[in-house]
Image (spheres, rainbow, N blue to C red):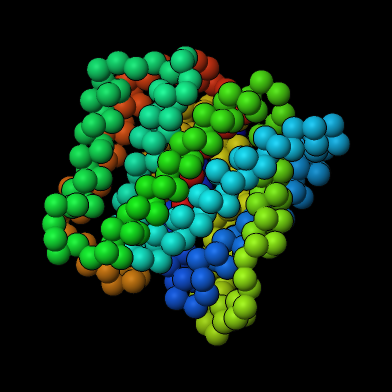
Amino acid sequence: MQKNAYLVFGLLALVWGLTFLFNKTSSTLISPEQVVVVRVVIGFIPVFAVAMIRRKLRWAHLRHIHHFAVMSLLAASVYYISFARGIALLPTSVAGMLSGAIPMFSFVAAAIFLRSEPINRRSIGGLLFGFAGVMLIAQPWNTSVSVNDLAGIGYIAFGSACVGLSFVYARRFLSPLGISSLALCTYQLGLASIMMLTFTDMTNADAIFNDWKIATGLIVGLGLFGTGIAFICYYHVVEKLGAVKAASVTYIPPVIGLITGILILGETVTVLHVVAMTIILSGVFIMQSGRTPANPTDTRAHNRPEPA
């Protein structure tokens, strides 16, 4: 059973790593917001089906719908839109590398809003070290960096901050409710689907079918596998290996994003970019090793480190 869990772990890392590629190619035909509509709607279907089969959904849960709505914004709608816009402006490889900083934003949010979050020299040192890697990519001192690049980095940073806040919100308001993660994920994606369908202009969204490869990548790669099945896989890994080991999956997608950007999209990556990614992931590792989670085997795992 544990061997199977590691296979699922590998699948999860792969599909999350490929989300940068599918986001990028889809944005060449339709808007980032339309990409997110397809992503959350298609992703909702398998999650809802599994939640129904396992009988995890309860009418009584509706009394907490305001919390589910906040999570759908922080961990789905706004997060996905920010990343989709950032990926549309940046090379896939750069966006993937920047996503490795998500745990840093989670740590900052937890340190500010959760008194139980441990803070020590090691965790602070890792945070600063990782932040230095982000600065190497952003290079705000370099006048040759384009406005689009800075905007793309800003979108990725904002999306990462939303994810960080979602972890804190979930731990503070949802964990005490004892609702299964599968049910929470269903409500989150369901409400995100409703909100995105309501407020997104879908004019010319059918342009995605001008290229069947890109359409397949969006619907099957990003929506079905990268969102819906990825959620299910993550909770399976958490259940079998524990939340701490499952959280380490966040180290792999940035590398996959880098590789796919180079090999598939033909993007140019400098040595400085690779060094920066190494610094970011090393900083996250140092930071995480300096933390002592209150309950490292918590199978609810609301602090899901999804990269994109």
Q: Residue furthest right?
A: 59
Q: Residue furthest bottom?
A: 210
Q: Image point 58% across, 56% down: which residue?
A: 225
Q: Is residue 166 above or below residue 228?
A: above
Q: Image point 60% across, 81% down: which residue?
A: 204
Q: Is residue 153 above or below residue 300?
A: below
Where is residue 4 shown, x and y percent of the image? 56, 40
| Front-most of residues 55 and 203 | 203
* Res 2 visible: no
Q: Is residue 242 left or right of residue 224?
A: left
Where is residue 217 shown, x and y percent of the image? 53, 69
* Res 77 visible: yes
Q: Image point 54% across, 21% down: which residue?
A: 297
Q: Is residue 44 left or right of residue 226?
A: right
Where is residue 11 shown, x and y percent of the image? 50, 49
| Front-most of residues 291 and 297 | 291
